[in-house]
Amino acid sequence: MKIKNILLVTTVLMLSACNDFLEPDSLSTFNTEFVYSNVDDARKGVNAIYSYFGQDAFRSRLSNNMVGNTDIEHQSGWSSAADRYQIWDLKASPTNKDLDIVWTFAYRAIRDANISIEGILGSNAFNSPDAVTSKTMHHLLGEAYTLRAYWYSMLIFYFGDVPFITEAPKAGSNFYLPKEDRNVILSQLIQDMIDTEAGMFWADQTPYGIEQVNREYTLGMIARLALQRGGWFLKPDLTMAREGDYLEYYQIAKDYSKKLMDLKDRPLPADYRQVFMNECKFIAPVNSDILFEVPFAVGNGDVGWNIGITVQGGPTSLHDYGSGNNYMAIPPTYYYSFDTTDVRRDVTCALYKVNMNFEEEFVGAGTSPSPTNIAQGKWSRHFLDTPPGKSTAKGTGINWPMLRYADVLLMFAEAENELNGPTGDAQGALRRVRERAFPVAYWATKVDEYISNVSGGKESFFNAIVNERAWEFGGEMIRKYELIRWGIYSQKMTETVEGLKKMADDAFNGTGTLPDYIYWKRDASGKFKVLNPNKKILAAPDETWTRSPFLIDLHDNTLTYDEWITRDWANYTNGTVRYIFPIPTIGIENSKGTLKNDGYGFGGG
């Protein structure tokens, strides 16, 4: 079932006025008291916070478009001076419009969260003698705290220390707050969620299931932000650091991931592909893998437009699915990092696209071949049950996953390993994720033997977690944040570039075993089929197969390597990645001199 316009359309217009966060519209005491005096109107007030997921700040930027480049996704930021290209190339200026909208809408969401928090805490309904009313208001409070935590987490990843606003706007407030230390902010956000999670509903107790914030998601977010707080971060002097109390936050991550595992455990669905196909089919099961997904209404959302399997469409196409692209390509190094029996690879990595004739063909086929432009395969507009129309592009209505139970299991394994090494509990959590990734016949070697081999020490088990998270969450665009908190961003980028160069050399010199050329065709049912995805062959068995360049395309006769190999990660491989961006000009100007872009090499402007 798809929720249409319930969570994303704000029904309390006064709570979502488009004003800057430093100069918000004042809300009268009467209005706030009225809105939060009863459950139904309080629900509408909290809905205002969700509305910002429907803006470009989230639906195309924070969800996927701004999250490259990593070792499992990339885009060529150097090929244009446009705003998103500046971000991909780590050279965004304060006038960058993408940064502007993220900053602006993040603080609008935070403002509306603050209004809801104060309104709920000050409401008689919060402590109503009616148990249902009181419980519902406590749950709404938890939603508001959790949504506020998400937006601050993103602001910190992109801008470092930022103003920490926790009060609803009112006459006489100081709207010109200075930056607050990122660790102070994260500590408070974590504590807010710890204080409220027990009063929240589980997804199967809520009207909208996993399409609204629930207790599962809040418990998972406590763990996620605790690992962010306990992880590495970039300081203004361009060095990486972590706080001396980091183990306390790994303990919180362990405790709260374990709390969810104890109170609301669930098996991971056996069919990995179905987890994401459900989103394309508007199915949102509770007590399953996805804990919370942003419920894009039909006509909203960019999944299947700028991320997912490419569909070539338009008015002259022979199908009604419209057109969609893939802005974040998967490098071949990631594709070939998978075990060939891992079912996640062919779900995550699509070697095909859909052409104007509604035929599946190799990504390197057509008039503009890009043989190594492997797509994010978990979503596509051509998976929709109802074609949205020939000329459609955006607005597929496909939901976006925010947190999965597999993530909770791996966060527990990581935290337990950091605290106590690769204990049986840590191994057990990793085992649950790997068992879903392989057919039962392979468990003895791919699960049991593998886990035994990586559990010889804390470092080897940590490296296994780093790899497992790459294989499990490819395309879900959380890798950037993980590489940052682990402090290995530049290391992984360097490994990727060197790996791609080796693939290029092996293909050009004829010394490799991987496919220089792909042989592909459509089977009798019209489905795309590859003869040799894992090995080099000299020729196909018959003429029904089409030969297309693949890894041989990584070589360039003039430059030695395709330019994207040497340039996509050029600003990521110099030892420390400057992933922090300057505060947008609008934030600087509206702060009346309080904020400036000091540190990080920005020159104070």
Image (cartoon, rainbow, N blue to C red):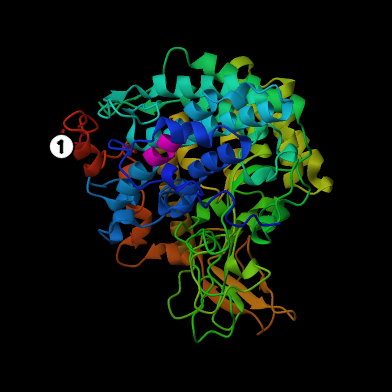
Give the residue type at disc 1: Gly
- Which quarter of the rendering shows the C terminus? top left
Magenta residue span: 106-112
> In the figure, is residue 255 to the left or right of 299?
right
Res. 73 in view: no
Circle 1 Cα neighbour tier, 10 Å, few/some/many (<14 / 14–19 / ≥20): few
Q: Quadrant of the N terminus?
A: bottom right
Whole-percent x and y of residue 143? 57, 34
* Above or below, 509 relative to 590: below
Place residue 112 in its image quadrant.
top left
Front-most of residues 425 and 211: 211
Q: Is residue 320 magenta?
A: no
47 sits left or right of 534 in the view: left
Residue at x-position 44% and y-position 57%: 505
Q: Residue 318 location, x and y as percent?
A: 58, 85
Q: Is residue 282 above or below residue 470?
A: below
Q: Is residue 332 left or right of residue 435?
A: left
Q: Is residue 29 above or below residue 423?
A: below
Residue at numbered disc 1? 605
Q: Position of residue 367 (x, y in %)?
A: 44, 81
Q: Residue at x 28, y 25 (%)?
A: 172
Q: x, y (%) of residue 272?
A: 72, 51
The quarter of the picture where residue 471 lies is: top right
Q: Is residue 336 above or below residue 165?
A: below
Number of callouts: 1
Q: Main secondary structure of the magenta part?
A: helix
* Residue extending farthest right: 441
